[in-house]
């Protein structure tokens, strides 16, 4: 779930599709591949006894998988959509996650309080202004030297162009304009993060997904 101007945007983009989100992801998004990659990368940057925040946790799959891999750490799933959170809490392993209600643009976390923050398929739901606000919130709650991990749409290639155009019709051309131009890494850098890098690109039915990592200055 995401928010723009204090309006909820469920994980599937429309509340009527929330309960279809998981099966759609499994069928069209190579979910097992990209979620596993993101869990492994996040796990590497999470110190023993650390805290990880999954911003816009939606139906909770990523947060639950990360918590299962790291019993020594605290994993927080943050979302503002009650239906998505209810689905997340019904899944096996959800008891290992702390579920907090909150918006990406106004996180219910203290400054300098988490080691790793993740935002998967969150930013493309937000307006350009809200994207910057959400990334600023991620920078605020991270400890110095903490890591941000983003998995979201990047500039499509010839193979993924048609699917991405359909996604833009569904999610909005304004919200996805920076993604279409491949500017999300630049936006993260402009927020104040360092060592911004795209470490993987994955083709899916809906477009090219970029995996981006960055560090809060020490």
Image (cartoon, rainbow, N blue to C red):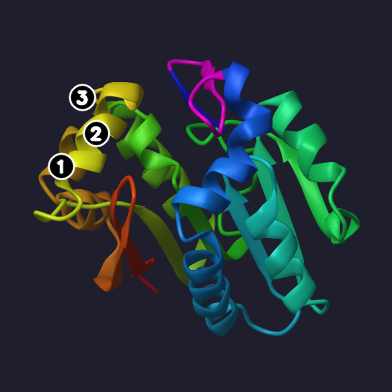
Q: Residues within 10 Å of mark 1 (few under 14, many from 20)?
A: many
Q: Earlier in the sequence, mark 1 or mark 3?
A: 3
Do the residues under discs 1 and 3 have CB atoms within 8 angstroms? no
Q: Residues within 10 Å of mark 2 (few under 14, many from 20)?
A: many
For residue 117, side relative to residue 48 (left or right) = left
56 and 205: which one is in front? 205
- The location of residue 59, given as percent across then percent down, is 68, 42
Task: Residue 173: give its label.
Answer: 3
Residue at (34, 23) in percent of width and height: 170
- Classify residue 19 by image quadrant: top right
For residue 24, side relative to residue 194 (left or right) = right
Q: Residues within 10 Å of mark 3 (few under 14, many from 20)?
A: some
Alpha-carbon distance for marks 1 and 3?
Answer: 9 Å
- Classify residue 173 by image quadrant: top left
Please identify the dominant SS of the magenta region: loop
157 and 105: which one is in front? 157
Residue 57 in view, yes or no: no
Residue at (74, 60) in percent of width and height: 64
Residue 35 in view, yes or no: yes
Alpha-carbon distance for marks 2 and 1?
Answer: 6 Å
Q: Which residue is mark 1?
A: 180
The residue range painted magenta reads 5-14
Q: Quadrant of the C terminus?
A: bottom left
């Amino acid at each position: 779930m995401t928010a723009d101007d204090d309006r909820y945007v469920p994980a599937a983009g429309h509340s009527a599709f929330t309960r279809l989100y998981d099966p759609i992801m499994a069928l069209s998004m190579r979910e097992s591949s990209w979620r596993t990659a993101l869990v492994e990368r996040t796990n590497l940057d999470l110190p023993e006894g650390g805290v990880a925040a999954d911003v816009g946790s939606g139906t909770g799959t990523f947060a639950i998988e990360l918590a299962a891999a790291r019993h020594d750490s605290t994993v927080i799933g943050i979302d503002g959509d009650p239906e998505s959170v209810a689905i997340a809490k019904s899944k096996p392993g959800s008891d290992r996650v702390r579920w907090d209600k909150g918006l990406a643009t106004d996180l219910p976390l203290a400054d300098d309080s988490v080691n790793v923050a993740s935002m998967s398929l969150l930013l493309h739901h937000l307006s350009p202004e809200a994207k910057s606000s959400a990334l600023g919130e991620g920078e605020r709650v991270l400890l110095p030297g903490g890591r941000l991990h983003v998995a979201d749409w990047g500039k499509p290639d010839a193979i993924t162009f048609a699917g991405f155009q359909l996604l833009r019709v569904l999610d909005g051309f304004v919200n996805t304009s920076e993604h279409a131009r491949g500017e999300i890494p630049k936006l993260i850098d402009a927020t104040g993060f360092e060592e911004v890098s795209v470490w993987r690109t994955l083709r899916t039915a809906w477009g090219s997904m970029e995996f981006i990592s960055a560090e809060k200055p020490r």
